[in-house]
C-alpha cells in the first residue's frame, strides 16, 4: 500500500521552459531553459482554465519517434495558487486513466472498491453500445459485493481556492457519461473518479459555473447511486506521487473563477 507522497509513476526527468503560446488546440511553443524554442504536442484540447499561463513555466517530455510528428509533449504547468504557493499541474489528458489504474493495482482504493480479480480498459457499453467505459473491474469471489464496477475517469485541473472542479467548460460528452453510469445501476456499480492532477486541493465539487447542466446531472447521479471517489496526485520533474482520496461537496458552485 502506498503512503501519501510515495512515487506512483517514475520517468526520465522532464525538460523545463517558458510557455510562449498555445495554438490550434494541439500545439504549444516553449522556450527551453537552454534558449531553444520548440513546438510541443498539447494533449489537452480544452480551455485549460486556470493552468494556461503564457509566460509561465512548463515541463516537456522529449520522446522522438518516426511515428510522431512532434518529439516534444507538454506534460506539466506551474501555477500560482491563492496561497501564493507554486504548484505543478499535470496537463497531459492521456495520463489520468493510467494513474488511476496504477493506483487501483497498488491497492490505494481497496477500501472503496474491494479486492479486484481483473481489469479491462475501454470496454464498449451503454445505450446502443455507443460508449466506452474507461475501466471495468471484476471483483474477487470473496468480495461481499459481487457486482462488476464501471469506472469513468475525469482529468481535473481547474480550482477555486482549495476546491478542485470538473468540468472547466461545457461538456456534452461528460453529461452523456454521467447518464451512462446511472444506467448500469443497480446491476453493476458505477463509479466516477475525478483525477485531481495537482496536490494543492482539499476537496472536489462539480464545476457549475462552467457547466450548470453537468452539475445538475452530477447530483442526480449521486442520488441514483453513482459513487464519487476523487483521487489526488502530485506532479514532479521525474515522478508522480500518490496524494490520497479527497472528499467531495455535492452542492452548486456558481461563483465565477
Image (cartoon, grey):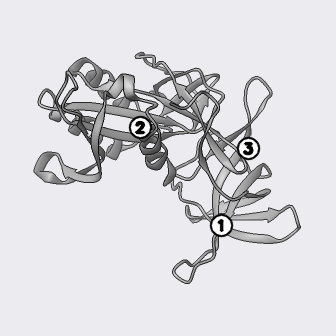
Q: Looking at the image, which residue is at 75% across and 63% down?
A: 30
Q: Where is residue 141? Give x, y as percent.
A: 18, 32
Foreground tag (2 vs 3)? 2
**Quadrant where the image shows the C terminus:** top right
* Residue 224 lies in quadrant: top left
Q: Looking at this view, name the residue that lies furthest to the front.
A: 142
Q: Where is residue 158? Give x, y as percent.
A: 57, 35
How crowded pointer 1 is (Cα within 10 Å; few <14, some 14-19, many 20+) is rated as: many
* Cα–Cα gap, marks 2 and 3: 27 Å
| 72 displayed left or right of 24 | right
Q: Please tell me the numbered disc located at residue 40.
A: 1
How crowded pointer 2 is (Cα within 10 Å; few <14, some 14-19, many 20+) is rated as: some
Q: Is residue 157 visible?
A: yes
Q: Where is residue 200? Give x, y as percent.
A: 66, 28
* Sequence order check, earlier mark of 2 and 3: 3
* Sequence order check, earlier mark of 2 and 1: 1
* Sequence order check, earlier mark of 1 and 3: 1
Reading the image, the residue beneath label 2 is: 104
Query: Vertical placement of 212 versus 134: above or below?
Result: above
| 23 displayed left or right of 152 | right
Q: Where is residue 38? Give x, y as percent.
A: 74, 71
Reading the image, the residue beneath label 3 is: 78
Q: Looking at the image, which residue is at 58% across and 28% down?
A: 3
Marks 1,3: beta carbons within 8 A: no
| 90 displayed left or right of 211 | right
How crowded pointer 3 is (Cα within 10 Å; few <14, some 14-19, many 20+) is rated as: many
Instruction: Say what secondary structure mark 3 lies in.
Output: strand
* Residue 222 lies in quadrant: top left
* Cα–Cα gap, marks 1 and 3: 16 Å
Foreground tag (2 vs 1)? 2
Instruction: Say what secondary structure mark 1 lies in.
Output: strand
Q: Looking at the image, which residue is at 73% across and 43% down?
A: 78
Amino acid at each position: 500500500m502506498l503512503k501519501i507522497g510515495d512515487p506512483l509513476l517514475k520517468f526520465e526527468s522532464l525538460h523545463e521552459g517558458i510557455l510562449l503560446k498555445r495554438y490550434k488546440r494541439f500545439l504549444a511553443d516553449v522556450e527551453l531553459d537552454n534558449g531553444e524554442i520548440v513546438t510541443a504536442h498539447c494533449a489537452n484540447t480544452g480551455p485549460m482554465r486556470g493552468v494556461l499561463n503564457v509566460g509561465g513555466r512548463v515541463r516537456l517530455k522529449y520522446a522522438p519517434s518516426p511515428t510522431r510528428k512532434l518529439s516534444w509533449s507538454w506534460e506539466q504547468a506551474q501555477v500560482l495558487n491563492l496561497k501564493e504557493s507554486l504548484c505543478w499541474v499535470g496537463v497531459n489528458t492521456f495520463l489520468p486513466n493510467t494513474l488511476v489504474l496504477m493506483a487501483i493495482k497498488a491497492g490505494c482504493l481497496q477500501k472503496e472498491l474491494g479486492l479486484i480479480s481483473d481489469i479491462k480498459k475501454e470496454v464498449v457499453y451503454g445505450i446502443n453500445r455507443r460508449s466506452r467505459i474507461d475501466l471495468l473491474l471484476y471483483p474477487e469471489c470473496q468480495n461481499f459485493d459481487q457486482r462488476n464496477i464501471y469506472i469513468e475517469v475525469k482529468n481535473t485541473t481547474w480550482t477555486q481556492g482549495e476546491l478542485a472542479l470538473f468540468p472547466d467548460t461545457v461538456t456534452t460528452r461528460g453529461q452523456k457519461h454521467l447518464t451512462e453510469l446511472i444506467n448500469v445501476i443497480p446491476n453493476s456499480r458505477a463509479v466516477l473518479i475525478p483525477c485531481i492532477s495537482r496536490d494543492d486541493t482539499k476537496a472536489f465539487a462539480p464545476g457549475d459555473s462552467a457547466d450548470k447542466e453537468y452539475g445538475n446531472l452530477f447530483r442526480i447521479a449521486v442520488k441514483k447511486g453513482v459513487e464519487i471517489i476523487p483521487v489526488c496526485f502530485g506532479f514532479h520533474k521525474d515522478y508522480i506521487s500518490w496524494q490520497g482520496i479527497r472528499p467531495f461537496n455535492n452542492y452548486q458552485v456558481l461563483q465565477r473563477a
